[in-house]
Amino acid sequence: MDKQKYVFYILFGLLCPAVMGIYYVSGIGCINAIGLEMVIGILSSGAALLALKEYGGTRKPIGHWLSALIPLIAIPLIPVAMISHSGLEAFLARGRVPFATMEGFAIAQLVLGVLMFRGLIFKRGEGRLMMPAIGFVIMSSVLRIRSAFINPARILREIGLQKGQTMLDYGCGIGMFAIPAAKIVGNDGVVHALDIHPLCIKTIEKEIRKRGIANVKTILSDRETGLPDESVDVVLLYDVLQFITDRDSLMEEFHRVLKPDGRLCATAEHLEVSEFLDVITKDNLFTLVEQKRKVFRFERN
């Protein structure tokens, strides 16, 4: 399923010059637009082929880096190149439709490039995940945009997080949930923000210092939390489980740190729901209580 992103990316890279050719034959487009898109298409498709070769283990994802960078550069370059070649008057007269088409393809490639990069990053395994700086920037940008749509504070309230509780945000990323959770649990509560990537931890630590938040504790770890037995009220596993290799050990760790009346709240994104439920309820460690929107809530057995 993940490799379909590469196919779609390459398809977009090859399809746009063909569409521009049709525009040219019909009198809508101009030859310079076709030439520009031919260059962009060749570069981006070549980057995607290189990225596909890198998929699943390389430590230097050059192809993935270029797959995001090429369309990112192309988006502002397209109008500049078209106007400089044909002039503003010709651009306004017959270049707006080709411009909109090329921009649409470039934006689609950028989105797919980001998804491809993200897929490579998290498929390196949970043992020693090292993300290049550009990858972290891309991931951070995606998460910030995403947080504006999903409303993390609302989700936390819906799962029942309360003042004075202790929460473990496992795979905390840049703190999309950890920061609002700190406000909900208040000074009498604690939020443990755990992630495998040092840049995620540094980002959260910088943010809590800037905001003067004292009840967020960061943990840099690939799995073990280091927390005492039965010390956590809520474990949040939001859009993370698909990246975990040793899921059985992770469930055992969650069972260990949760209080007897604690709950595990998780999402089944990028997994079949049946597979997701089998992983969490295996060995009768947890029982499904309810589902609110995308979040499943489990109680500790």
Image: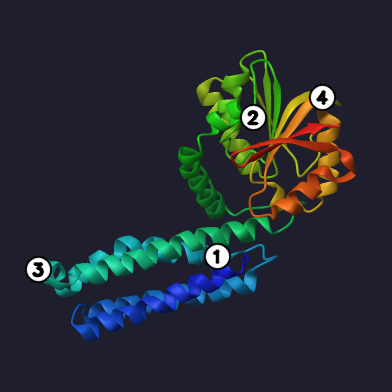
State the residue lying farthest toward the right.
283
Q: Nearer the viewer, residue 43 or 14?
A: 14
Judging by the rendered image, the residue that carries numbered circle 4 is 259
Q: Which amino acid does label 2 sit on?
A: Ile
**Mark number, residue 159:** 2
Q: Earlier in the sequence, mark 2 or mark 4?
A: 2
Q: What residue type is labelled 4?
A: Lys
Judging by the rendered image, the residue that carries numbered circle 1 is 64
State the residue lying farthest toward the top.
188
Q: In the structure shown, which secondary structural element does the residue marked by tag 2 occupy?
A: loop
Q: Which of 149 and 60 is in front in this view?
A: 149
Judging by the rendered image, the residue that carries numbered circle 3 is 89
- Relative side of 253 to 137, left or right: right
Q: Which of marks 3 and 2 is nearer the N terminus?
A: 3
Q: In the structure shown, which secondary structural element does the residue marked by tag 3 occupy?
A: helix
State the residue lying farthest toward the bottom.
25
Q: Which of marks 3 and 1 is nearer the N terminus?
A: 1
User: Alpha-carbon distance for marks 2 and 1?
Assistant: 36 Å
